[in-house]
């Protein structure tokens, strides 16, 4: 018990340090977005299975490249997926993954949509604030860290939710310009 509590406290301190300390600069390089989504899927397969959640990739997923610090983007996508999976407990559900392209602005949106209970309109405006949580466990730092990472990537993160109809998070990132 002491070991697990020490580990839990270590995780809390790590999250606080990450929130309040500038992230180590990582080189932004062009990365295949589908490859990153594939890595995230591979990492969460056990969690999906144990939580009775089905991963549903949609036809909008297409090859494209974005400039990013790959590990940071994986962290964002993992956090969004884990939150979605947790929201659908105990019954399970479906996690849809899609993309939306805004070619006029040169951006791609990666969409994670769950079939969970949704988020109330009172909580929705405060989702990205530090320490905002509706969970029994955790500090409520995950989404604020995600927000900061996406800002550093010159991107944007948006959320849409209706109670009883699930939640959809979209991470907008600049596309790498393709030479003609």
Image (cartoon, rainbow, N blue to C red):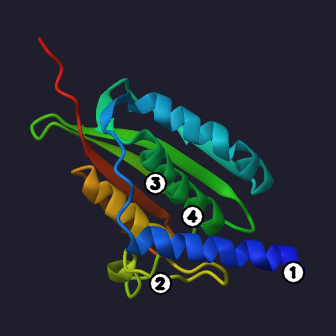
Q: Determine contact: label 1, label 2, CB under 8 Å.
A: no
Which-is-in-front pick, marks 3 and 4? 3
Which mark identifies residue 2? 1
**Which is nearer the N-term, disc 2 or disc 4?**
4
- The residue identified by callout 3 is 76
Q: Position of residue 115 (x, y in %)?
A: 56, 59
Q: Earlier in the sequence, mark 2 or mark 3?
A: 3
Return the residue at label 2: 131
- In this view, the residue in front, 54 or 143, is 143
Q: Are marks 2 and 3 in contact (CB under 8 Å)?
A: no
> In the rendering, at what x and y percent does residue 108 appear?
27, 39
Please tell me whether mark 1 or mark 4 is closer to you in this view. Answer: 1
Q: CA distance from mark 3 to mark 4?
A: 11 Å
Q: Is residue 48 visible?
A: yes
Whether tag 2 and tag 4 are in contact, CB under 8 A, the answer is: no
Neighbor class of circle 1 (other Cα within 10 Å; few <14, some 14-19, many 20+) is: few
Q: Which residue is mark 4?
A: 83
- Looking at the image, the residue that sits furthest to the right is 1
């Amino acid at each position: 018990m002491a070991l697990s509590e020490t580990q839990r406290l270590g995780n809390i301190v790590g999250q606080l340090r990450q929130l309040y300390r500038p992230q180590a600069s990582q080189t932004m390089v062009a990365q295949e977005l589908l490859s990153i989504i594939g890595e995230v899927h591979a990492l969460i397969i056990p969690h999906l299975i144990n939580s009775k959640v089905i991963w549903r990739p949609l036809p909008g997923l297409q090859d494209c490249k974005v400039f990013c610090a790959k590990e940071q983007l994986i962290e964002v996508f993992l956090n969004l997926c884990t939150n979605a999976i947790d929201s659908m407990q105990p019954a399970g559900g479906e996690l849809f993954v899609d993309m939306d392209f805004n070619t006029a602005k040169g951006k791609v949106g990666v969409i994670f949509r769950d079939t969970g209970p949704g988020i109330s309109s009172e909580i929705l405006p405060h989702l990205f604030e530090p320490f905002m949580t509706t969970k029994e466990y955790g500090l409520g730092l995950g989404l604020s860290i995600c927000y900061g990472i996406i800002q550093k990537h010159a991107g944007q993160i948006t959320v849409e939710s209706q109670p009883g109809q699930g939640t959809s998070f979209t991470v907008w990132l600049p596309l790498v310009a393709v030479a003609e």
